[in-house]
Amino acid sequence: MLDFIAAFVDENGYSPSYDEIAHALNLASLATVHKHIIDDHICDGDMVLIERNQDFRDGDIVVALVKGVETSLKRIYREPRNMVRLQPANSEMKPMYYQASEVEIQGRLLAVLRKFR
Protein backbone atom coordinates (compact mmCIF):
# COMPACT_ATOMS: atom_id res chain seq x y z
CA MET A 1 0.00 0.00 0.00
CA LEU A 2 2.79 2.40 0.90
CA ASP A 3 4.56 1.70 -2.41
CA PHE A 4 1.37 2.44 -4.34
CA ILE A 5 0.74 5.69 -2.46
CA ALA A 6 4.33 6.88 -2.91
CA ALA A 7 4.28 6.09 -6.64
CA PHE A 8 0.89 7.79 -7.06
CA VAL A 9 2.12 10.96 -5.34
CA ASP A 10 5.29 10.99 -7.46
CA GLU A 11 3.24 10.63 -10.64
CA ASN A 12 0.32 12.93 -9.81
CA GLY A 13 1.61 15.42 -7.26
CA TYR A 14 -1.16 14.64 -4.75
CA SER A 15 -2.30 11.72 -2.61
CA PRO A 16 -4.74 9.13 -3.96
CA SER A 17 -8.27 8.91 -2.62
CA TYR A 18 -9.34 5.89 -0.62
CA ASP A 19 -11.35 4.79 -3.68
CA GLU A 20 -8.25 4.98 -5.86
CA ILE A 21 -6.24 2.97 -3.33
CA ALA A 22 -8.94 0.30 -3.06
CA HIS A 23 -9.26 0.03 -6.85
CA ALA A 24 -5.49 -0.13 -7.46
CA LEU A 25 -4.99 -2.81 -4.81
CA ASN A 26 -8.13 -4.79 -5.74
CA LEU A 27 -9.67 -4.30 -2.30
CA ALA A 28 -13.39 -4.99 -2.08
CA SER A 29 -14.07 -2.51 0.70
CA LEU A 30 -13.00 0.98 1.71
CA ALA A 31 -13.04 -0.31 5.27
CA THR A 32 -9.93 -2.31 4.42
CA VAL A 33 -8.19 0.87 3.26
CA HIS A 34 -9.28 2.65 6.45
CA LYS A 35 -7.92 -0.21 8.52
CA HIS A 36 -4.47 0.18 7.00
CA ILE A 37 -4.36 3.97 7.04
CA ILE A 38 -5.48 5.28 11.33
CA ASP A 39 -4.56 9.13 11.29
CA ASP A 40 -2.39 11.86 9.56
CA HIS A 41 0.59 11.28 11.85
CA ILE A 42 0.97 14.94 12.76
CA CYS A 43 2.54 14.81 16.21
CA ASP A 44 3.15 17.33 18.97
CA GLY A 45 6.23 19.35 18.10
CA ASP A 46 5.85 18.85 14.34
CA MET A 47 5.93 21.91 12.13
CA VAL A 48 3.52 22.21 9.25
CA LEU A 49 4.12 24.06 6.00
CA ILE A 50 0.93 25.76 4.88
CA GLU A 51 0.24 27.30 1.47
CA ARG A 52 -2.01 30.35 1.76
CA ASN A 53 -4.87 29.34 -0.49
CA GLN A 54 -8.64 29.23 -0.15
CA ASP A 55 -9.12 26.52 -2.79
CA PHE A 56 -9.31 22.92 -1.67
CA ARG A 57 -10.32 19.45 -2.80
CA ASP A 58 -12.34 17.12 -0.64
CA GLY A 59 -9.95 15.34 1.71
CA ASP A 60 -7.31 18.10 1.76
CA ILE A 61 -5.89 19.04 5.13
CA VAL A 62 -6.60 22.72 5.63
CA VAL A 63 -6.26 25.47 8.18
CA ALA A 64 -9.89 26.45 8.78
CA LEU A 65 -11.04 29.51 10.68
CA VAL A 66 -14.39 28.52 12.19
CA LYS A 67 -16.95 31.21 12.98
CA GLY A 68 -14.15 33.78 12.92
CA VAL A 69 -12.68 32.66 16.25
CA GLU A 70 -11.31 29.10 16.21
CA THR A 71 -8.54 27.87 13.95
CA SER A 72 -8.27 24.16 13.25
CA LEU A 73 -6.09 21.86 11.14
CA LYS A 74 -8.46 19.23 9.72
CA ARG A 75 -9.41 17.34 6.58
CA ILE A 76 -12.28 19.08 4.85
CA TYR A 77 -15.15 17.67 2.82
CA ARG A 78 -18.06 19.36 1.06
CA GLU A 79 -21.41 18.04 2.26
CA PRO A 80 -24.98 18.51 0.95
CA ARG A 81 -26.98 21.64 1.75
CA ASN A 82 -23.95 23.96 1.61
CA MET A 83 -22.31 22.30 4.62
CA VAL A 84 -18.68 21.35 5.18
CA ARG A 85 -17.31 18.59 7.36
CA LEU A 86 -14.05 19.09 9.26
CA GLN A 87 -12.74 15.60 9.93
CA PRO A 88 -10.26 15.13 12.79
CA ALA A 89 -7.42 12.68 12.21
CA ASN A 90 -7.99 11.31 15.70
CA SER A 91 -10.55 8.55 15.25
CA GLU A 92 -11.83 9.10 18.78
CA MET A 93 -13.03 12.61 17.86
CA LYS A 94 -16.27 13.14 15.97
CA PRO A 95 -16.45 15.08 12.71
CA MET A 96 -17.60 18.68 12.93
CA TYR A 97 -20.25 20.06 10.57
CA TYR A 98 -20.65 23.73 9.72
CA GLN A 99 -22.38 25.90 7.18
CA ALA A 100 -19.83 26.70 4.48
CA SER A 101 -20.27 30.41 5.28
CA GLU A 102 -19.01 29.74 8.84
CA VAL A 103 -15.67 28.33 7.66
CA GLU A 104 -12.90 30.37 6.08
CA ILE A 105 -10.07 28.35 4.54
CA GLN A 106 -6.80 30.07 5.33
CA GLY A 107 -4.47 27.57 3.68
CA ARG A 108 -3.68 24.00 2.65
CA LEU A 109 -1.14 21.66 4.20
CA LEU A 110 1.90 21.16 1.98
CA ALA A 111 4.24 19.28 4.30
CA VAL A 112 4.80 18.05 7.83
CA LEU A 113 8.28 18.67 9.18
CA ARG A 114 9.47 16.49 12.01
CA LYS A 115 12.66 16.96 13.94
CA PHE A 116 14.20 13.70 15.11
CA ARG A 117 16.37 13.78 18.18
Image (cartoon, grey):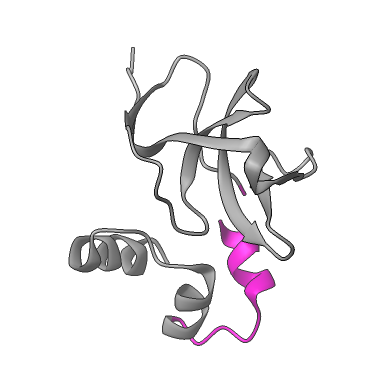
Q: Residue at x 32, y 17 (%)?
A: 115
Q: Nearer the viewer, residue 19 or 102?
A: 102
Q: Quadrant of residue 86?
A: top right
**Looking at this rendering, what residue extends furthest in the front direction?**
101
Q: Is residue 79 left or right of residue 107?
A: right
Residue 44 visible in image:
yes
User: Where is residue 80 drawn, in percent x and y?
Assistant: 72, 66
User: Where is residue 55 drawn, in percent x and y?
Assistant: 39, 49
User: Where is residue 32 drawn, in percent x and y?
Assistant: 64, 71
Q: Quadrant of residue 10?
A: bottom left
Q: Quadrant of residue 112?
A: top left
> Which quadrant does the N terminus fall into?
bottom left
Q: Residue at x 31, y 59 (%)?
A: 14
User: Where is residue 97 drawn, in percent x and y?
Assistant: 76, 46
First to last magenta residue range: 25-38
The answer to whether residue 62 is above or below residue 50 is below
Q: Is residue 60 left or right of residue 89?
A: left
